[in-house]
Image (cartoon, rainbow, N blue to C red):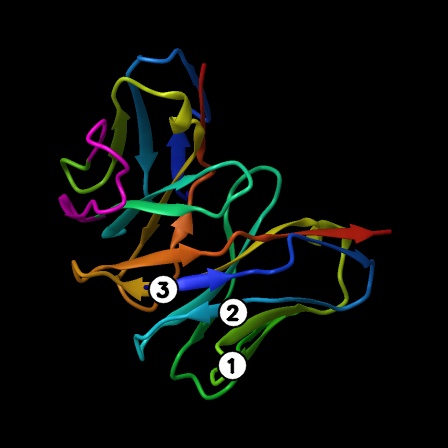
Amino acid sequence: GAGVSQSPRYKVAKRGQDVALRCDPISGHVSLFWYQQALGQGPEFLTYFQNEAQLDKSGLPSDRFFAERPEGSVSTLKIQRTQQEDSAVYLCASSYPQGDNEQFFGPGTRLTVL
Amino acid sequence: AQKITQTQPGMFVQEKEAVTLDCTYDTSDPSYGLFWYKQPSSGEMIFLIYQGSYDQQNATEGRYSLNFQKARKSANLVISASQLGDSAMYFCAMRVFSNFGNEKLTFGTGTRLTIIP
């Protein structure tokens, strides 16, 4: 079956622009996660959804970052007024059910802010 | 606070040899899970193996095994009979439960493994 998909795969933005990154989780997966991976580093947690509810957004680095999952499936991570330090790979992962199961990751979106 | 430490930034191994990638962790939570993921140059994180904190036996998945030493808080990945396709970044991660009741993964900084023909 289809895995987690993300779009776009690559995004170049000028500083100050808004961007929107999309994640399509595996069908039926309840849990959805966003991670940020800076160059040469491991992924770092940003936010978590259980169905449409955003239960944990403790990892979002600033109020310029906003995520939503209005119907409990597709999720969008939005970054407003992008800064150079936002340049990273943004990974989406899903799992079902919550608990012992692994998180399945998408290919990521590489964001470059000029 | 939870932390994962991977002390080997890079490793070079001859093809067909076994390789051990080190991982130590720190948590005060008695219940946790440990994962290893492989990240090739394409960027996708590929799940390799999982070990639960209460599992009595070390996890194995094909050529991958996890050397779990709970008292030492280490969870090293062993790859037997390495192949050229094993060249990638390898991340150790720990599943923790946040104050919000959900799980999330905390990752180490990774080890870049290069297999030499």
Q: Residue at x 51, y 81 (%)?
A: B72
Give the chain of mark 2.
Answer: B
Q: What is the quadrant of the N terminus of chain B in the image?
A: bottom left
Q: Tell me, yes or no, if residue A27 can be seen here.
A: no
Q: Could you tell me residue A90's position as x and y percent?
A: 40, 35
- Tell me the residue that label 2 is attached to: B24
The reply to whether discs 3 and 2 touch (Cβ–Cβ < 8 Å) is no
Q: Amino acid at mark 2?
A: Thr
The residue positioned 18% from the left and 61% from the top of the image is: B99
Is B36 on the left-hand or right-hand side of A76?
right
Q: Which residues are magenta?
A: A49-67
User: Farthest residue toward the bottom?
Assistant: B56
Of the pair A95 and A55, the residue shown nearer to us: A55
Q: Secondary structure at mark 1?
A: loop
Query: Between marks 1 and 3, how big is the CA–CA gap?
Result: 15 Å
Rendered image: mark on residue B2: 3
Subunit that carries the residue with mark 1: B
Pointer 1 or 2: first along the chain: 2
- A34 and A64: which is toward the camera: A64
Q: Is residue A66 magenta?
A: yes
- For label 2, the crowd category at 10 Å Cα-Cα, with few meaning under 14, some 14 to 19 and many 20 or more, is many
Image coordinates of residue B55 in percent, x first then y, are 42, 83
Q: Chain of mark 3?
A: B
Q: Residues within 10 Å of mark 1 (few under 14, many from 20)?
A: few
Q: Are marks 1 and 2 on the same chain?
A: yes
